[in-house]
Image: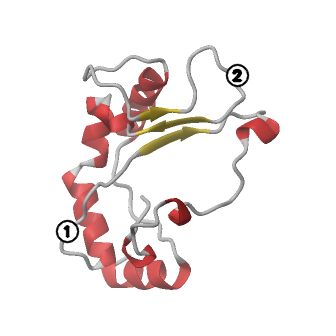
Amino acid sequence: MNNMKENRKLINEGFVFTDQVFSLEDAENSKNAFWSVINCKYDTGIEPENRFWNPGDNPKDIIKIDKPHLSSKVIFDLITNQRFGELLANITNSKKIQVWHSQGVCKPPGGGHRGNAGWHRDIQYWPFWESSGVLTA
């Protein structure tokens, strides 16, 4: 896909699939890094901003951690990857892309209502942004 087609699809349909940006190894390393943060192992020495699940809590509950990139260099490097940022900037016709927030969410299989957030949008939780300027990647 070219960037103009991707931009039109994003505008018309609200989402777009891109070519692969990260390797399977990158994905696996990031998954492992997130599980380390879930288990309170922070390679940066910094705790995430908020935790909505802790070791010992019900394993079928949704696990949500705000700003896990503060706690893991691997996650930080993933979300600040230059190639990823350039791709998003090109697709959105933006001069600059800025990471404002990161959130790690795990919805465990078999969690029933405890592990299901349903289909939803989060823009209502960020009232200080115009919806036209927010991109979830």
Q: Residue at x 68, y 23 (%)?
A: 59
Pointer 1 or 2: first along the chain: 2
| Neighbourhood count class around disc 2 (C-alpha, 10 Å): few under 14, some 14–19, many 20 upward | few
> In this view, which residue lies farthest toward the front?
128
- Spatial CA span between label 1 and label 2: 40 Å
Residue in view at x 19 percent, y 54 percent: 82
Q: Crowding at label 1, few (<14), some or many (≥20) Cα neighbours within 10 Å?
A: few
Instruction: Assign the N terminus to one quadrant of the image.
Output: bottom left
* Towards the viewer: 26 or 31: 31
Q: Is residue 6 above or below residue 122?
A: below
Q: Nearer the viewer, residue 131 or 43?
A: 131
Label disc, if present, on residue 111 of the rendered structure:
none
Q: Position of residue 42 (x, y in %)?
A: 34, 20
Numbered disc 1: secondary structure: loop
Kindly identify the amino acid type of the residue bearing the numbered disc 1: Lys
Mark 2, secondary structure of its residue: loop
Residue labelled with disc 2: 58
Kindly report which numbered mark, 1 or 2, lies closer to the viewer in this rendering.
Answer: 2
Which disc is residue 96 wearing? 1
The correct choice, above or below, for 101 with respect to 51 in the image is below
Residue 115 in picture, x, y percent from top left: 72, 38
Q: Amino acid at mark 2?
A: Asn
User: Camera-side residue: 104 or 33?
Assistant: 104
Q: Position of residue 33 (x, y in %)?
A: 39, 27
Q: Quadrant of residue 24?
A: top left
Asked if the residue at tag 2 contacts the one at tag 1, i.e. Cβ–Cβ closer than 8 Å, the answer is no
Q: Position of residue 98 (x, y in %)?
A: 25, 60
What residue is shown at x 44% (from left), y 61% (from top)? 136
Q: Quadrant of the C terminus?
A: bottom left
